Image (tube, rainbow, N blue to C red):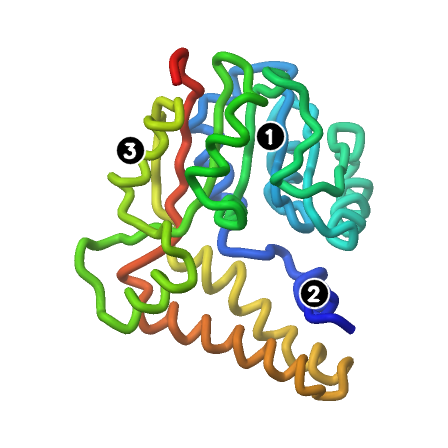
Amino acid sequence: MTDFSLLIDLHRDQPRQGPGDDSQTKCAIELAGLPARNNLQIADIGCGTGASTLCLARDLNADITAVDLFPEFLEVLEHRARTLQLDSHITTCAASMESLPFAPASLDVIWAEGAIYNIGFANGLRAWRSFLKPDGIIAVSEITWLTANRPEELTRHWETAYPEIDVASSKFKVLEAEGFSPLGYFVLPKTSWLDHYYRPLQAASKDFLERHHHSRDATEIIAAEEAEIALYEKYSDYFSYGFYIAKRSETT
């Protein structure tokens, strides 16, 4: 198996592939003012196995295109959607977020929980803006500093892993520079990380290692996940995902 195949195998059966939970998705839905709108065309980009997609489908009058690079994740989403009788509202699409198949000004909403970092916050906003209608909404969760000063170890880690990490005020400046008017913002709580992402992942680790006979690659993947969890548990007061909701503005 390649490393990607191992990562897919580890994460495929998890409720989420990153921090978040339904209550936070619902909060963002409300801040975006979406419940009052009908016949929405939504793209959920980097949807994974579809936790946010299913929440959007349950709560909104919408047709949702769920986009992910990995067909294996989309297969899980399709099964879950059929089980919940939401499949008539969801279309899956295996595609890179750098090469999306949408027509200009065709979407009411672009949704991306914990995914925009794959192409960078500014680059993602710039690349996706043209797909939105003039009054279109973008809602993304993005790794964000919660304080102005941080421990050196933590700063060094994240500035190496994701140089675009910054405080929320700087992220708002990026939003405005890329042609968006901010509508709302909130921080994901620790439960979104621990109860809904890290703890289920840890619970799956033993079976994952046994499936792959404790191979070096599988063991290294679990070790990396545990190191990430330890870093969060040690420094969770200093960073989280910020959820940013903004409207496409009339001028760029």
Q: Could you say which quadrant of the image residue 133 lies in? A: top right
Crowd tier of the residue under label 3, counting other residues whose Cα lies within 10 Å: few below 14, some 14–19, many 20 or above: few
Residue under label 3: 173
Quarter of the picture containing the N terminus is bottom right
Residue under label 1: 59
Q: Could you say which quadrant of the image residue 238 lies in? A: bottom left
Residue 250 horizontal/vertical position (percent): 41, 11
Which residue is painted at 61% across and 25% down in the image?
60
Which residue is painted at 66% across and 50% down in the image?
48
Residue 88 horizontal/vertical position (percent): 80, 29
Mark 1 secondary-structure assignment: helix
Q: Is residue 21 visible?
A: no
Q: Could you say which quadrant of the image residue 131 lies in? A: top right
Residue 228 horizontal/vertical position (percent): 46, 71
Mark 2 secondary-structure assignment: helix
234 relative to 71 in the view: left or right: left
Give how far apart the Cα atoms at labels 1 and 3 are: 30 Å
Q: Is residue 120 visible?
A: yes
Along the line of sight, which residue is nearer the eye, 159 or 219? 159
Which residue is painted at 37% across and 55% down in the image?
163
188 relative to 109 in the view: left or right: left
Above or below, 81 against 18 in this view is above
